[in-house]
Image (cartoon, rainbow, N blue to C red):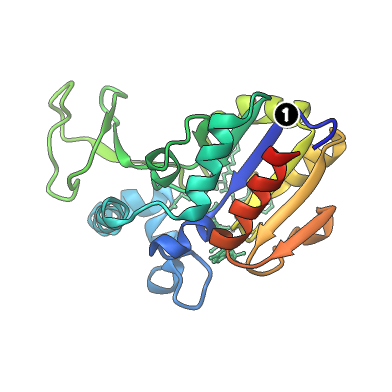
Amino acid sequence: MDGVRNIVILTGAGISAESGLRTFRADDGLWEDHRVEDVATPQAFRRDPGLVQRFYDARRENVLAAEPNAAHRALARLDEEWDGELLIVTQNIDDLHERAGAKRVLHMHGQALSAWCLACDARHRWTGTLLDGPGCPACGEVAMRPDIVWFGEMPYEMERIFSALARADLFVSIGTSGAVYPAAGFVQQARSAGARTLELNLDRSQGSQWFDESRLGPASALVPLWVEEVLSE
Ligand code: BV8
């Protein structure tokens, strides 16, 4: 890809849909069973911590039972073989990018397999449950919450994301509806930095008009073809 050295890739729930992890806004989507306000806000956690812990304990179990698909594996190959800059910014709380072998991954909305102690601020890899109020391995306090960025909370590592967008030659969005900010605004930032913009998605996203090119279809088919294209040029 002539003139392309620095690539930023944004992924959303759509890239993990074919691994059996439900997306958010599909008609069987996660937010179908729960109102966002009831499970994914700091107010909800204060109001009914049991409901929120149960919701994320179930998500954690689903993540542990899921396997990476061909789209995750293709991005891991790109990460392995691309000698320019590459950053995979994911909105997903699953670890399927890493389990496929990708290294240059940033979880801007947190991780299901991480618990955050509100007493000592420690973060711990966590594969069990939090509903039963386990003590923090570092301070022993029973004060751990899912290490997830909820609505109204600042996403993680925004500085690192903004500086990568400012240097990007190519911005690629995969499996996201473009409904949630600040992630939904990245395409415009990349464009204003002069980057080419490409979306790979089942349907047109809400920000589709901002992309130079939109390829519609399942990620497991579109992503391996795109990676082959990038690495063979
Ligand atoms: C913040 C973790 C401020 C939890 C998540 C500007 C305008 C309007 C509103 C706002 C704004 N700025 C901020 C807001 C408020 C809010 C927001 O955006 N609200 C929306 C609803 C309007 N944003 C926030 O609150 C953010 N925080 O702004 O903080 C601040 C500032 C200073 C100081 C302090 C605070 C935080 C947002 C993060 C919330 N947490 N996740 C959890 O996962 O449980 S968001 C969550 O929803 C996901 O992480 C993701 O980001 C979003 C879901 O979107 P997608 O991943 O795109 O999934 P979706 O189901 O919607 O779409 C799937 C897509 O895949 C579809 O397009 C489909 O076609 C496609 N697809 C399906 N199958 C496939 C496929 N594609 C390919 N192949 C397939 N097989």
Q: Please, is residue 29 above or below residue 21 in the view? A: below
Is residue 115 visible to us here?
A: yes
Crowd band around label 1 with a 10 angstrom C-alpha radius: few (<14), some (14–19), many (20+): many
Amino acid under label 1? Asn
Q: Which residue is mark 1?
A: 6
Quadrant location, the N terminus: top right
31 or 79, which lies in front? 79
Q: Is mark 1 within 8 Å of ligand 1?
A: no
Q: Nearer the viewer, residue 232 or 80?
A: 232
Q: Is residue 195 left or right of residue 42?
A: right
Residue at the farthest front position = 232
Position of residue 35 in the picture relative to residue 221 (left or right):
left
Which part of the image, by quadrant, shows the C terminus? top right
Name the residue at 54% across, 46% down.
74
Residue 21, position as x, y percentages in the image: 39, 61
As drawn, 161 above or below 52: above
Residue 202 placement, left or right of 103: right
Residue 33 on image: x %, y %: 38, 72
At x 53% / y 69%, what residue is drawn? Answer: 25
Q: Secondary structure at mark 1?
A: loop
Residue 160 point in image, percent of width and height: 61, 25
The percent coordinates of residue 193 (x first, y second) are 84, 32
Which residue sits at x=24%, y=53%?
57
- The quadrant of the picture showing ligand 1 is bottom right
